[in-house]
Image (cartoon, helix red, strand yellow):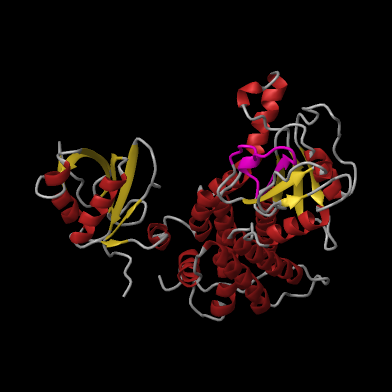
Amino acid sequence: MWSSTELIVAPATVPGPGARAIVRLAGDGLDALLARMFTAEGSGFARPGESPRVVSARLAASGLGAEWGDAPVEILHWPGPGGPIGGPLAEVQLPASALLVEAVVAEACRHGARLARGGEFTLRAFLAGRLDLVQAEAVLAVVDARSPDELAAALDRMAGGAGARLAAARSLLLDLLADIEAAIDFADETTPDAVPAADAATWRRVRDGLVEAATMIDDVAAGLARRDASAAAGLPRVVLVGRPNIGKSSLFNALLEREAALVADEAGTTRDWLEVPLPSAAGPVCILVDLAGMPADPAAARDAIDARAIAVARSELARADVVIVCRDVSDPDLPGVSVAAHAVTLEVVTRCDQAKGQPDTVGYAAFRTSSVTGAGIVSLRSAIIAAVGELPPRSSPATLRMAVGLDAASTAVAEARRLVTPPGVAERPDEAVVAGCVRRAVESLGEVTGAEIGVDLLDRIFSRHCIGK
């Protein structure tokens, strides 16, 4: 059966060149495992209850040291019960050798650890209350970020930007709910400290609190909409790239069926990028981007503006979802461009109307197009729409969860506000109905952050009203 205290191990850095690599270990029995695998220097590892420390150590001579020598390592050690995951945790920093990382992980497994499942360290941090659900899901968003905007939004969520504001709104609603339910459940008690029935002053406090909570929720929802419109929820970007003066801008215009880009015979007419939504019967499906020509030799830039245009083109390529790599029909080679690993690539030959009487230099499957005759344009546009349709959703689970939860919470708070603002002065709100609306709002926010309602609400009823003291 799965346990949140089981001893686990996993590499924490991606394979590849670098100065250092990190192996992360956590769980019960961590201290004994570290003592077996490493020989600590100085004051040694921290003890339970002590502050975390960085420990200089070497591979144990009786273990990995026999094969790898006494290689020095640095170990960041949280002894527990505090720390990022609420229990013992160690991050072993060692030389960035893939073989050494594998050896350390295998040695830990031989001594009783198991390989951690994907996201298990983050899950333990969530279960220990070190992260809310928004922050936990934001960890994945940080890893998957494909642009500076996406990364900024994910880092804000991971740092608790949105989560902290939602927690404050939920805390306020819990206080209001505690007041209302205390009035319902305990107003008939005959004890001297019984809670009085909700009066006009109580309802004014509830009404003011609902207005404040609604403002907080709406602010988070507005920020989410702004960020995701420009980052995760925007249209996919389809970028045309190729050498200068090969007909890219003419192809760009043909795909859009209008003159959106300036076309001239001189090389370098496009010095910046131009982006326009690509229309379809169902509306815009992507952003079509025409880049400046990429010379075979980056050092061949004619001036500072040309160099800047090439730099911008590379930046656009890095965040493209689909890349259309273009070459002239007379050019036997594709341009040497660097395309992001996640991007879909389509190869296109331009100006095929000029190939009459010339040998076929294409030699492989590619879209053959002519902006003059229109040949291949419809097929290429269909291929772009198909490629865009197969891209994974750009909204992360955190985005979807927040959008649904915020909408439900906002609706419930609006209904509660309507109930506590009756048309008649003498009319008294129904405490049970108002409490039901507030509870729905609290539960909706709890689904966003991963919090539960039961203990929190009981704690507020008893601590705020001294029941059973």
Q: What stretch is highlighted in magenta?
A: 317-338
Where's residue 87, x and y in %? 30, 57
Spot occupied by residue 243 in the image (x, y as percentages of width and height) = 70, 34
Tell me what residue is drawn at x 83 percent, y 72 percent: 424
Answer with left or right where residue 358 lies relative to residue 397: right
Q: Can residue 60 be seen in this view?
A: no
**On the rendered structure, is 336 left or right of 19?**
right
In this view of the protein, which residue sits in the foreground, 317 or 333?
Answer: 333
Relative placement, left or right, of 105 versus 395 is left
At a point 74% along the width and 72% down the height, the residue shown is 419
Q: How many labels, in total?
A: 0
Residue drawn at point x = 31 percent, y = 51 percent: 24
Residue 116 rendering spot, x and y as whole percentages: 34, 61
Q: Nearer the viewer, residue 392 or 191?
A: 392
Quadrant of residue 339 within the rendered picture: top right
Pick out the residue farthest to the left: 62
Considering only vertical position in the picture, is 242 above or below 136? above
